[in-house]
Amino acid sequence: MASAVSQPIDPNNVRDPNSKSAAKKEAKRLEKEAKLAAKTAKSPAGPAAGEGKKVKAEKKEKEVEPEYVNTTPKGHKKDMSGAMAAGYNPLAVESAWYDWWSAEGFFKPEYTLPALQGQDLQNQETFVIPSPPPNVTGSLHIGHALTVAIQDAMVRWNRMLGRKTLFAPGFDHAGISTQSVVEKRLFKAEGKTRHDLGRERFLETVMDWKNDYQGRITNQLHRLGGSYDWDRVAFTMDEKLSKAVIETFCRLHEDGILYRANRLVNWCVKLNTTLSNLEVDQKELEGRTLLQVPGYDPKEKFEFGVLTSFAYEVIGSDERLVIATTRPETMLGDTAVAVHPDDPRYTHLHGKLLKHPFIPGRHLPVITDSIIVDMEFGTGAVKITPAHDQNDYEVGKRHNLEFINIMNDDGTLNADAGPKFQGMKRFHARVEVVKALKELGLYVGSQDNKMQIPICSKSGDIIEPILKPQWWVDCKPLAEEAIRRTRLGELEINPKQSENDWYRWLDGIQDWCISRQLWWGHRCPAYFVRIAGESQDVNDGAHWVVGRTIEEARSRAEKLAAGREFELVQDEDVLDTWFSSGLWPFSIMGWPDKTADLSKFYPSSVLETGWDILFFWVARMVLLGLHLTGEMPFKEVYCHAMIRDAHGRKMSKSLGNVIDPLDVIQGLPLEELHKKLYEGNLDEKEIAKATAGQKKDFPKGIPQCGTDALRFALCAYSGGGRDINLEILRVEGYRKFCNKIFNATKFAMLKLDEEFVPQPSAKPTGNEGLVEQWILHKLNIAAAEINTHLGERNFMSATNSAYNFWLYELCDVYIEAMKPMMDESSPLATRQSAQQTLYTCLDNGLRLLHPFMPFVTEELWQRLPRRPNDPTPSIMVSQFPVKDSAFVFEEAEKQFDLVFTTLKAARSLAASYTLQSDIQFFIQVQRDEEEKLFAPQIPTIVSLSKGCKSAQVVRTAADVPAGCGSTVVIPSVIIHTLVRGLVDLDNEIAKCDKKLDFARLNLQKVVKLESQAEYAETVPENVRAANTDKRKTLEAEIETIETSKNMFTQLK
């Protein structure tokens, strides 16, 4: 028996030629003919007789599409009544929607999804993300775009799941960075410093900068599609947030957590301010290295990575004690030399004094210390400079040594360094100290020394440890509580590798210096109480008071002065930026006031950020949040990867690889990329280097990709690793995916004629054919997978599931397979069912994509008709598809998977013989149920096989015509295609012999495996079953190849 299908019958022969669809077809035919006629009329005449050579027709230039102009009034809904555009244009698709979403209030947590209106929402879940506030130092880069893409995907997904959702936007004043960039710009433009302007005028200048860049960043966030509630936008120096900063400072001081002390700090000479340990990078040196230092002549370089040895003379003796140092200039601040108490070499020197060669009258005691001294390292003697080295500071504390600060804030040496070196810059002094030691005969030698040097992450300057009276936070008790509460399960940190870093850092936490010698920031609400007629140490915290207001500070000062006259002098310093941003999740909700937002939206649901600021920011929010509110500020921390360029390099303006997300969205020619380099503070040398980098990475500029493609690509990169090497070509590839979705929907819309009305429910009716059940089942799987992956924060897998459904299941299979179902020769019920299934897939498929691609999904979803009684105005407030048992068709999936596997085998078979047209397939089956499966699927197989003329189901090899090439799908299904007269028979026989050898070898391996002793007892059942299937398939394959060989032999 054989079931077959011939070429489709002309529908005009069986249907009313005056029907609507027939009229459409006729109109298209006439339009084609008209175009062909016009083309023929325009073509040049052929060559005259005898002219010989043909004239090559001129290549027709591609018609340039006019630039899109958005005519939708701001906040109005885009008019979708016109025809769809000829092609996908991201700038056109993405226009107008954001303003409409915002105007309609869809971003606000108070908005209720239409599907939930009228329901009891007393216990409605909330989902809150406090957006990490971007710094107002400059425009956003591609790393910020990653943050927006991930966070907004989570927000939109949760909103569509029916949760009360708040995405809170804001901006950070970024004290050091913003002041630094404004100072650079001021000097570059006007040749002035902040001191030339004075504090008030300079702060006005910085505020102008802040307002400019806050506006630019806001525009970028709009273009990126972030669904923020802009009515709740915050800035770290707003009145509300400043109140929280002052309250925190005062409360921590009152609780004994915040104190003032004269301790070693990380001093940046270039920025003239203190830095926290987290703002200091460690540069690895393998040995002697010459480095340029900010603030010096660019031609000057200084020696680092060298261990210099010199001698101190022992007073009252002709002995000398040799020590070694990597910072020779600091010997001017030495106050002792330490040896190990058990070192017999120096027992006789314990308690002796050493003579300082450059500071008259300064004598250095020889002390014993088993902690800092390693007898085996160097000479076993260590110079101690308590005011300029952290380890030495601890030694100084243990032995009550003198702390001598030899350095001014500008990096020059002060009077304590001695008259010979006073006023010298620190690294000039390094050179001169070595020179002077040589002159005195005290220089011993130098050698390469592998080491790390501390570098300011903001300016690149070499950090100098200096003694400064500052405000400090005692972090130990705060960290202990954070560790305890995290271990109790109150905080989940993902990926898990970041959780290990979290505990390690909190365990080793040090006190936090929060004073900064800047003008831009929150000024410390601390006041020195200068009592008339008394000598007071300004470094002593006992003479300081704090106050939420000047009145509160004055009241406390009066108690301290006890009736004596006094003056209040406010601390000139400002607070570390991270001190204010550490309050972010609750300060934006109105804390310390008990506001409605604080009670509804705190703690937050998720804090999403880069792993590189897990300690800068996340840890401090937890420390402060627990202490001040008693609650963990968020339930989960998700750390995304750091974006690097395609070569794996960190993004850097001087490399020219920093990318503005708007340039990826809109596209930018190479020349314009070069011009943007001049907008920053790069010098000419850096601009030349960056220009070369841009030419190499973007030889044709940056292509226009659109927001949706950029967001999807960034999410697709996010699979839990610590770094992302971003390639713009991959982003451009996802623009093609957007184009595929656009064109597929446009084509599908042609199948939903004007009379089409979706069913009231998306639930299957029970009348669906096999391929419909299959695609609905795949839709259900995609929905289940995407929800699971988003819940697990696996954005790579979530985008992969959405991509695979759209591209490989909906577009490649169902839309193609439904073509014969939509043929006018098909029964009306079949066509209508196919339409309903298509609609359900488009509707739900667009919803599944929406969190990643908000604009194109809205544009296309608005083109679809709504189900009866569905008032949903926008896809972003529609319901997100979830797993539904009504869409489970497991048997249909197995059956159609076999059909599709057979189809793919047929395509491969035809391709192996380079068949491109008039292809005939014969599907040989053994069982009745297989014939029953394949017979009705013949139109689908023909439709999905390019160049296929016909397909038949046959039951025996005798039903297969002679001259066919064959392949086994499964042991009971073999696909044949007619190749008689199209192939070299000897060549095909040789191929068969080669295939037979390979198949027999594989069969021997399986049989040998199955013949092993105790095979049944030792091999798992699933492995045995797989081996059995493999053996049967190989046996069928061998039989088929032998048959083909015999057939080709007989044809000779």
Image (tube, rainbow, N blue to C red):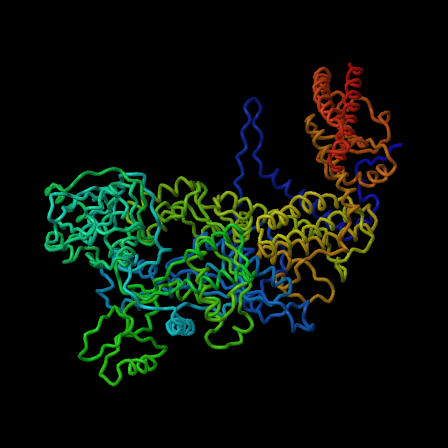
Q: In the image shown, does 345 or 970 lie closer to the viewer?
A: 345
Residue 596, image x and y in percent? 53, 76
Image quadrant where one finds the N terminus: top right
The quarter of the picture where residue 956 lies is: top right
Residue 258's place in the image compared with 723, above or below, is below
Image quadrant where one finds the C terminus: top right
User: Going by the image, does 330 lie left or right of 39?
Assistant: left
Q: How many marks?
A: 0
Residue 163's place in the image compared with 22, above or below, is below
At a point 82% along the width and 45% down the height, the residue shown is 825
User: Going by the image, does 115 lie left or right of 688?
Assistant: right
At a point 87% along the width and 33% down the height, the residue shown is 2
Residue 999, image x and y in percent? 72, 23
Q: In the image shown, does 887 or 316 lie closer to the viewer?
A: 316
User: Going by the image, does 422 lie left or right of 6?
Assistant: left
Outermost residue toward the bottom in this view: 563
Q: In the image shown, does 850 or 537 lie closer to the viewer?
A: 537
Residue 885 in view, yes or no = yes
At a point 30% along the width and 54% down the height, the residue shown is 390
Residue 686, image x and y in percent? 31, 46
User: Going by the image, does 709 lie left or right of 653?
Assistant: right
